[in-house]
Amino acid sequence: MRVVHLVESLGGGVLSSVLTMVDATPDIEHHLLTWPRRDHADTGDERGVFDSTGALPRRPLAAARALRSEVDDLAPDVLHAHSSYAGMLARGIELDVDVLYSPHCFAFERRDIGAAPRAGIRRVERALVGRTAVLVACSPHEAVLARDLGHRRVVTVPNRALHVPDERARFAAPLRVVTVGRISAQKDWRHLLAAKRSFDHAGAWPAQWEWLGGGDAGAEAELREGGIAVSGWLPREEVVRRLASAQVYVHTAAWEGAPVSVIEAASVGLPIVARRIPTLESLSVPGLASSPEDIALRVAGLHDPSQWSAEQQSSLAFAADHSVSAQRRRLGTAYQHTPAAALILS
């Protein structure tokens, strides 16, 4: 079987998710196409695992022509489009191939745009339902949203850590508190700053805070001014190493798909403190907190070694639920897209 993956960048969580899919299905021939609509950080993720790689032009019409040509040349059994714009491109033109679509968080869940744009995005998504062979959801929450749009072939494929590391986080004081990702409205760096301010205001214990990643220059400056170090973009191996040397993973995103960074942090045994949002609730992520103040309280509670150890076990159990075998089984269902597998929510 031959699958072509269409992604929008060569870094970040979406490519991490694709790499786990490739790793889980070594019997499938995987090809990678990138549509770089805007500048993205290339985090150096391994692309040698793909049978071929290519890039589409940035302009939509040229990208559409190039995608049609690539599909004709590669003759895949399936085109798997990842994220909103790639999904619109792949499903908005006539292609002689079944198109699977992974939103990795529907764009109408964004909270940095108004109600009218979100409603418009929802209408576009609904209009493209009939051009989608299978909707590949990354969480039960996303599967429910897909069903509400009108999709009837929905398969939930769990994300996971690409490689389960040998490293294990250990308790130490002062706590090192880390988060991972692009510094953006979606990751809501202001929420993290508010949590740190609340933590500092309590004044009970010192802690070191670091954002592993990069993004908006102004936001980076505000984070540093607020006492949160910013590493800039790092190779994946270095991210995992820094996760394993930390004591707490904090996740403050305002909207999400199924963040690989949370699973990677859990896989090294880091206690998780995460903002309570629908997708993380549907995934049963441990350590959910409803406000910056609640996040600060949870982080402070992890200064107790016994509490820290208990939360580490919760993280390891959560990571174990996101296994390669489950991912392989669900991908097989999605790529075969048989009518009998019409809807899988979890």
Image (tube, rainbow, N blue to C red):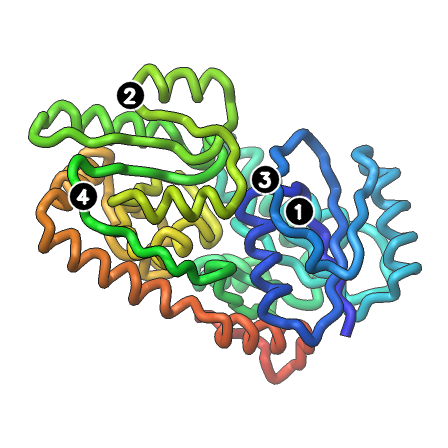
Residue 193 location, quadrant: top left
Nearer-N-terminus badge (2/1): 1
Q: Is residue 60 above or below residue 68?
A: above
Q: Which residue is more in the foreground, 291 or 116?
A: 291
Q: Is residue 100 above or below residue 325?
A: above
Residue 131 visible, this angle: no
Q: Any mark on residue 172, and which?
A: 4
Q: Residue at x 16, y 59 (%)?
A: 310
Nearer-N-terminus badge (3/4): 3
Nearer-N-terminus badge (4/1): 1
- Badge nearest the viewer, 2 or 1: 2
- Badge nearest the viewer, 3 or 1: 3
SS for dot 3: loop
**Residue flagged by tag 1: what amino acid is it?**
Val
Q: CA distance from mark 3 to mark 4?
A: 29 Å
Q: CA distance from mark 4 to mark 1?
A: 50 Å
**Residue flagged by tag 2: what amino acid is it?**
Gly
Name the residue tied to disc 1: 124
Q: Position of residue 21 (x, y in %)?
A: 60, 64
Instruction: Give the side of residue 176 with respect to residue 308, left or right.
Output: right
**Mark 4 and mark 1 residues within 8 Å of each other at the beta carbon:** no
Name the residue tied to disc 2: 227
Q: Is residue 206 above or below residue 50?
A: above
SS for dot 2: loop
- Badge nearest the viewer, 4 or 1: 4
**Mark 3 and mark 4 residues within 8 Å of each other at the beta carbon:** no
**Residue flagged by tag 3: what amino acid is it?**
Thr
Nearer-N-terminus badge (3/1): 3
Q: CA distance from mark 3 to mark 1?
A: 31 Å
Name the image quarter holding the N terminus.
bottom right
